[in-house]
Image (tube, helix red, strand yellow):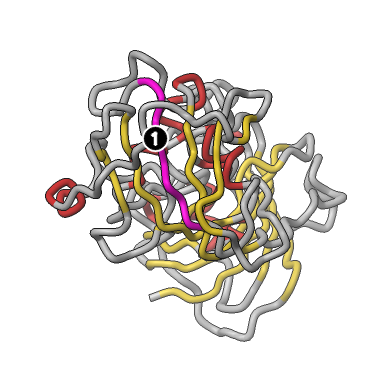
Amino acid sequence: MTTRRSSTLGLAALLALAACHPSRDNAQGESAGGENAAGATEQADSRASAGETAPNGDAEAARTPLHAPPDVAAPPADAERTTSGLASRVLSAGAGSEHPSASDRVTVNYTGWTTNGHMFDSSIPRGQPATFPLNGVIPGWTEGVQLMVEGEKRRFWVPANLAYGDDPRPGAPAGMLVFDIELLDFTRPPTVPSAPEDVAAAPANAERTASGLASRVVTPGDGTEHPTARSRVTVNYTGWTTDGRMFDSSISRGQPATFPLNGVIAGWTEGVQLMVTGETRRFWIPANLAYGDHPRAGAPQGMLVFDVQLIRFE
């Protein structure tokens, strides 16, 4: 159930993988065209990740340009090069020993320039590092930051094919891009639950409603009241198709989702009202209560299976 959200990071649009490489799968399981997989239509969590602000970066950063390095036009002869064409050199060694993986969330300070020395974005003038999933940014960043250790500062020359290309969308920088990146911290993603044994179909002992929704309690809750369709709920959840493919999970993002219960797919609106606070319940949602058998591009089709933990509601 991926959710749309706002961010104050100028890195957002500049590094958004989905914006410049739409054919690549979103690592968070985003499958519903920018809505979450339960159909929520409002901003439902506060994850700071690349891809969420105006394409020209932060206005303050634009007013406070940082001087381009002397080697901004091209990587020097002593730069490290990978088989993809990415070039880099270490500016300051780090104190860490481990490297982030593509699925980790990283926290960085950075500045980006075009090869003519124009600074198009920087976290430095904003005074706030950027945090985002490493597999949610341009390929040059995904590859390059994995070369780093915590505390390291490195300069990258990212070729156009690993950035936005030579003829990018309006507002995005074209051609080779140069970044100075300092890796402040990184965290491993939470372990995502594997598909349940009964993912293919609801078991005989599942509760069924007149609409065709099936469910069973996985962990009882300690609450006594139930949310209504007008409630605002906070949940953790994981969703699978009946072949066991996980298409979305708040657990993989490490942050619960909050949304109005009447702003999601019908199966969620009906099903979560059966729950009490603290309860975890598995739902088998028929296609007509989800996205249908022939949904819009990117949305999961057919019956969907969700494990939902109701954390609170108001």
Left or right: 28 in relation to 242? left
Q: In the current view of this chain or complex, which residue is farthest to the left?
A: 63
Given residues 43 and 196, the one toward you in this image is 43
Q: Residue 282 falls in which quadrant of the image?
A: bottom right
Q: Position of residue 63 (x, y in %)?
A: 12, 50
Q: Position of residue 227 (x, y in %)?
A: 45, 71
Establish if 209 lies above or below 142: below
SS assignment for the magenta stretch, majority: strand
State the residue at coordinates (46%, 57%): 108
Given residues 226 and 1, the one toward you in this image is 1
Mark 1 Cα shell of 10 Å, populated few (<14), some (14-19), many (≥20): few
Q: Which residues are magenta?
A: 175-182
Image mark count: 1
State the residue at coordinates (50%, 74%): 226
State the residue at coordinates (58%, 41%): 144
Q: Is residue 128 magenta?
A: no
Kindly identify the amino acid type of the residue bearing the numbered disc 1: Asp
Question: Is residue 29 visible to us here?
Answer: no
Q: Is residue 178 magenta?
A: yes
Question: Is residue 165 visible to us here?
Answer: yes
From the image, tell me which residue sits under label 1. 71
Q: Position of residue 168 (x, y in %)?
A: 34, 19
